[in-house]
């Protein structure tokens, strides 16, 4: 992340949005320490996506989710 922020220019980057995976949390915090004007936030859509993946594994729900994904795509 640091390389990209420096390439773009720290004054042009306001926020970094990452998924909620544990390996992504530390670099976000480090980026905020190195660049005081930068905010790092976790993706709000990632948690529901993970929950839906778990629900999709249930037989009673999997078919419905598969159909809704086809419709939305």
Image (spheres, rainbow, N blue to C red):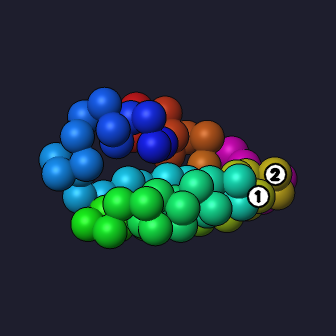
Which residue is denoted by mark 2 in the rendering? 57
Q: Up-down: is 65 above or below 15? A: above
Tell me what residue is drawn at x 33 percent, y 38 percent. 6
| Labelled disc at residue 54 | 1
Mark yes or no: residue 42 visible: no
Q: Up-down: is 63 above or below 27? A: above
Tell me what residue is drawn at x 41 percent, y 55 percent. 17
Q: What segment is highlighted magenta in the picture?
A: 59-64
Q: Up-down: is 69 above or below 57? A: above
Q: Position of residue 10 (x, y in %)?
A: 25, 48
Q: Residues within 10 Å of mark 2 (few under 14, many from 20)?
A: few
Q: Position of residue 15 (x, y in %)?
A: 30, 58
| 43 in the magenta segment | no
Q: Position of residue 9 (x, y in %)?
A: 23, 40
Tell me what residue is drawn at x 35 percent, y 60 percent. 35
- In the displayed orientation, state which residue is furthest to the front: 34
């Amino acid at each position: 992340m640091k390389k990209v922020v420096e390439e773009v220019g720290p004054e042009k980057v306001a926020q970094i949005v990452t998924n909620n995976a544990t390996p992504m949390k530390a670099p976000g915090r480090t980026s905020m320490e190195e660049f005081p004007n930068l905010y790092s936030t976790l993706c709000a859509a990632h948690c529901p996506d993970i929950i839906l993946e778990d629900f999709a594994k249930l037989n009673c729900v999997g078919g419905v989710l598969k159909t809704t994904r086809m419709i939305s795509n």
